[in-house]
Image (cartoon, rainbow, N blue to C red):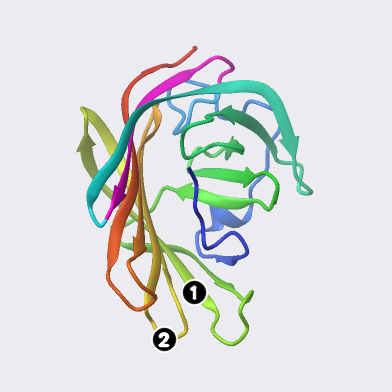
């Protein structure tokens, strides 16, 4: 379901962890305290919704599992494939930084690594920023922010990240809000797009965790 305007964005890292990613093996995200437990066979059960102008047009269940398939980028970071054919992570490979404060992602067919989520140190902290020059006449600018004050979603205590993309005229073009719970992983993703190039943002997709079976 992923619809990203920022796939070509070049991110400048603000948090040190986001710039110094490394991995010593195919499973750095395993463990009870991982912010995204990447143990083979772990399964997440989501309720997904698609919207049109804030009206639900489709609602369905979505199951995501960790596979044994891997991808290694040029820095040596190893990512595990997520089997999520009906959800946000369709075609995605995920890795957790050994310091357990960042989640990295690559998406087929682009395979360009980026920081999906990072643990902030203060509420509203700027985590990363980038520019998409695919339209040189009006580049897109993306800022990613993090919060440390917990948010309760379906009984999970979560941290929050927000990515906001604007055009050269400061019109919002996309917003992604993600919530992650330690020991559980991604609990909720909400995606927003404008009704027009200059209009306000409306939610067009959400994915919310109902339960998870984390393999220890």
Check disc 2 and report the residue beneath it.
169
Image quadrant in which you'd find residue 150: top left
Instruction: Give neighbour class at mark 1: few <14, some 14-19, many 20+ (Cα, 10 Å).
Output: many
Q: Return the x and y of residue 142 as percentages of the image width and height.
A: 47, 69
The magenta segment is: 39-52
N-term-proximal mark, 1 vs 2: 1
Res. 49 visible in picture: yes
Residue pushed farthest front? 57
Q: Return the x and y of residue 44 as percentages of the image width and height.
A: 42, 22
Image quadrant in which you'd find residue 209: top left
Q: Is 82 included in the stretch rendered in magenta?
A: no
Q: Return the x and y of residue 155 as percentages of the image width and height.
A: 20, 27
The label on residue 141 is 1
In the displayed structure image, the side of residue 88 where residue 137 appears, left or right: right
Image quadrant in which you'd find residue 94: top right
In the displayed structure image, the side of residue 173 where residue 124 appears, left or right: left
- Between 56 and 167, the residue placed more toward the observer is 56
Say which residue appears at 55% left-offset and 36% top-offset. 90
Res. 47 visible in picture: no
Q: Return the x and y of residue 24 as percentages of the image width and height.
A: 71, 32
Looking at the image, residue 146 lies above or below residue 70: below
In the displayed structure image, the side of residue 10 where residue 168 appears, left or right: left
- Between 57 and 14, the residue placed more toward the observer is 57
């Amino acid at each position: 379901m992923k619809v990203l305007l920022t796939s070509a964005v070049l991110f400048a890292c603000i948090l040190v962890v986001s710039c110094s990613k490394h991995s010593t093996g195919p499973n750095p995200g395993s463990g009870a305290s991982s912010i995204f437990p990447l143990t083979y066979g772990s399964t997440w059960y989501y309720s997904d919704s698609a919207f049109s102008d804030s009206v639900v047009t489709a609602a369905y269940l979505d199951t995501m599992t960790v596979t044994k398939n891997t991808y290694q980028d040029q820095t040596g970071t190893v990512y595990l494939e997520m089997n999520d054919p009906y959800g946000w992570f369709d075609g995605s490979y995920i890795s957790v930084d050994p310091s357990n404060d960042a989640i990295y992602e690559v998406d087929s067919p682009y395979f360009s690594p980026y920081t999906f989520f990072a643990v902030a140190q203060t509420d509203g902290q700027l985590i990363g920023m980038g520019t998409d020059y695919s339209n040189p006449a009006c580049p897109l600018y993306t800022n990613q922010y993090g919060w440390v004050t917990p948010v309760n979603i379906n009984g999970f205590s979560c941290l929050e990240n927000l990515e906001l993309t604007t055009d050269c005229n400061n019109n919002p073009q996309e917003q992604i809000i993600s919530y992650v719970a330690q020991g559980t992983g991604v609990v909720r993703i909400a995606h927003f797009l404008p009704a027009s190039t200059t209009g306000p943002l409306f939610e067009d997709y959400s994915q919310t965790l109902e339960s998870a079976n984390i393999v220890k």
